Image: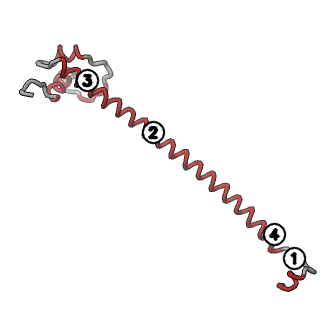
Protein backbone atom coordinates (compact mmCIF):
# COMPACT_ATOMS: atom_id res chain seq x y z
CA UNK A 1 0.00 0.00 0.00
CA UNK A 2 2.88 2.38 0.64
CA UNK A 3 1.62 4.98 -1.86
CA UNK A 4 1.82 2.55 -4.76
CA UNK A 5 -1.90 2.49 -5.48
CA UNK A 6 -3.79 5.08 -7.46
CA UNK A 7 -6.88 6.32 -5.63
CA UNK A 8 -10.28 5.73 -7.25
CA UNK A 9 -10.83 9.48 -7.01
CA UNK A 10 -7.81 9.96 -9.29
CA UNK A 11 -9.23 7.50 -11.83
CA UNK A 12 -12.60 9.26 -11.63
CA UNK A 13 -10.88 12.61 -12.21
CA UNK A 14 -9.43 11.31 -15.49
CA UNK A 15 -12.95 10.53 -16.75
CA UNK A 16 -14.31 13.85 -15.48
CA UNK A 17 -11.55 15.69 -17.31
CA UNK A 18 -12.28 13.77 -20.52
CA UNK A 19 -15.96 14.78 -20.36
CA UNK A 20 -15.25 18.35 -19.31
CA UNK A 21 -16.89 17.82 -15.91
CA UNK A 22 -20.20 16.67 -17.43
CA UNK A 23 -20.86 13.74 -15.10
CA UNK A 24 -24.28 12.98 -16.62
CA UNK A 25 -22.79 12.57 -20.09
CA UNK A 26 -20.00 10.45 -18.63
CA UNK A 27 -22.42 8.13 -16.84
CA UNK A 28 -24.60 7.74 -19.95
CA UNK A 29 -21.61 6.58 -22.00
CA UNK A 30 -21.64 2.86 -22.79
CA UNK A 31 -18.20 2.38 -24.30
CA UNK A 32 -16.01 -0.49 -23.21
CA UNK A 33 -13.13 0.53 -20.94
CA UNK A 34 -10.08 -1.69 -21.17
CA UNK A 35 -7.08 -2.23 -18.97
CA UNK A 36 -4.85 -0.81 -21.69
CA UNK A 37 -6.98 2.36 -21.92
CA UNK A 38 -6.73 2.88 -18.15
CA UNK A 39 -2.96 2.30 -18.19
CA UNK A 40 -2.60 4.81 -21.00
CA UNK A 41 -4.71 7.56 -19.43
CA UNK A 42 -4.30 7.20 -15.64
CA UNK A 43 -0.83 8.19 -14.41
CA UNK A 44 1.01 5.70 -12.16
CA UNK A 45 -1.73 3.06 -12.47
CA UNK A 46 -0.36 -0.49 -12.46
CA UNK A 47 -1.89 -3.28 -14.56
CA UNK A 48 -2.86 -5.35 -11.52
CA UNK A 49 -4.85 -2.48 -10.02
CA UNK A 50 -6.43 -1.56 -13.36
CA UNK A 51 -7.55 -5.16 -13.92
CA UNK A 52 -8.86 -5.53 -10.35
CA UNK A 53 -10.71 -2.20 -10.57
CA UNK A 54 -12.41 -3.17 -13.84
CA UNK A 55 -13.29 -6.65 -12.56
CA UNK A 56 -14.83 -5.21 -9.38
CA UNK A 57 -16.68 -2.61 -11.42
CA UNK A 58 -18.07 -5.27 -13.76
CA UNK A 59 -19.16 -7.43 -10.82
CA UNK A 60 -20.99 -4.51 -9.18
CA UNK A 61 -22.61 -3.58 -12.51
CA UNK A 62 -23.82 -7.16 -13.07
CA UNK A 63 -25.13 -7.33 -9.49
CA UNK A 64 -27.05 -4.10 -10.06
CA UNK A 65 -28.59 -5.47 -13.26
CA UNK A 66 -29.49 -8.72 -11.52
CA UNK A 67 -31.06 -6.79 -8.64
CA UNK A 68 -33.19 -4.83 -11.13
CA UNK A 69 -34.34 -8.02 -12.81
CA UNK A 70 -35.04 -9.59 -9.45
CA UNK A 71 -37.10 -6.59 -8.35
CA UNK A 72 -39.05 -6.60 -11.61
CA UNK A 73 -39.60 -10.35 -11.30
CA UNK A 74 -40.75 -9.99 -7.71
CA UNK A 75 -43.16 -7.22 -8.66
CA UNK A 76 -44.58 -9.35 -11.49
CA UNK A 77 -44.93 -12.33 -9.13
CA UNK A 78 -46.74 -10.16 -6.58
CA UNK A 79 -49.12 -8.87 -9.26
CA UNK A 80 -49.76 -12.41 -10.53
CA UNK A 81 -50.42 -13.64 -7.00
CA UNK A 82 -52.77 -10.73 -6.27
CA UNK A 83 -54.69 -11.45 -9.47
CA UNK A 84 -55.00 -15.14 -8.54
CA UNK A 85 -56.23 -14.21 -5.05
CA UNK A 86 -58.76 -11.79 -6.56
CA UNK A 87 -60.05 -14.51 -8.90
CA UNK A 88 -60.35 -16.98 -6.01
CA UNK A 89 -62.20 -14.42 -3.87
CA UNK A 90 -64.60 -13.68 -6.74
CA UNK A 91 -65.25 -17.43 -7.15
CA UNK A 92 -65.87 -17.73 -3.40
CA UNK A 93 -68.36 -14.84 -3.53
CA UNK A 94 -70.20 -16.53 -6.40
CA UNK A 95 -70.25 -19.85 -4.50
CA UNK A 96 -71.52 -18.13 -1.34
CA UNK A 97 -74.29 -16.46 -3.37
CA UNK A 98 -75.33 -19.82 -4.81
CA UNK A 99 -75.27 -21.40 -1.35
CA UNK A 100 -77.30 -18.53 0.16
CA UNK A 101 -79.89 -18.86 -2.63
CA UNK A 102 -80.12 -22.63 -2.04
CA UNK A 103 -80.55 -22.13 1.73
CA UNK A 104 -83.21 -19.47 1.14
CA UNK A 105 -85.03 -21.81 -1.24
CA UNK A 106 -85.24 -24.55 1.38
CA UNK A 107 -86.05 -21.98 4.07
CA UNK A 108 -89.09 -20.81 2.07
CA UNK A 109 -90.16 -24.32 1.11
CA UNK A 110 -93.40 -25.31 2.77
CA UNK A 111 -94.05 -28.98 3.32
CA UNK A 112 -97.58 -29.27 4.67
CA UNK A 113 -98.34 -32.78 5.78
CA UNK A 114 -94.78 -33.46 6.88
CA UNK A 115 -94.95 -34.26 10.61
CA UNK A 116 -91.70 -32.47 11.40
CA UNK A 117 -92.76 -29.36 9.41
CA UNK A 118 -96.18 -29.38 11.07
CA UNK A 119 -94.54 -29.75 14.50
CA UNK A 120 -92.27 -26.70 14.03
CA UNK A 121 -94.66 -24.50 12.07
Report the residue marked by disc 2: 72
Counting from the top left corner in percent of width and height, residue 100 is at: 73, 67
Q: Are marks 2 and 4 in contact (CB under 8 Å)?
A: no
Mark pair 4, 1: CA separation:
10 Å
Mark pair 1, 3: CA separation:
86 Å
Residue at 60% across, 52% down: 86
Mark pair 2, 3: CA separation:
27 Å
Tell which of 22 and 105 is nearer to you.
105
Label placed on residue 110: 1
Number of marks drawn: 4
The quarter in which the N terminus is drawn is top left
Q: Is residue 67 above or below residue 49?
A: below
Dot 4 crowding, Cα within 10 Å, few <14, some 14–19, many 20+: few
| Circle 2 or circle 3, nearest the eye | 3
Label placed on residue 105: 4
Tell which of 48 and 110 is nearer to you.
48
The quarter in which the C terminus is drawn is bottom right
| Circle 1 or circle 3, nearest the eye | 3
Q: Earlier in the sequence, mark 4 or mark 3?
A: 3
Residue 25 found in image quarter:
top left
Report the residue marked by disc 3: 54
Counting from the top left corner in percent of width and height, residue 75 is at: 47, 43
Residue at 46% across, 42% down: 74
Residue 90 found in image quarter:
bottom right
Q: Earlier in the sequence, mark 2 or mark 3?
A: 3
Q: Is residue 59 above or below residue 39?
A: below
Mark pair 2, 1: CA separation:
59 Å
Query: What is the residue that sits farthest to the right in this orientation?
Result: 113
SS at badge 1: loop
Amino acid sequence: RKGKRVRLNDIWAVFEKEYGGDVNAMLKEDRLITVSWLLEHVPHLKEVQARRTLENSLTRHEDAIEADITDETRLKDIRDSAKAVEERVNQMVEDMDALANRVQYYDRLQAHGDPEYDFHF
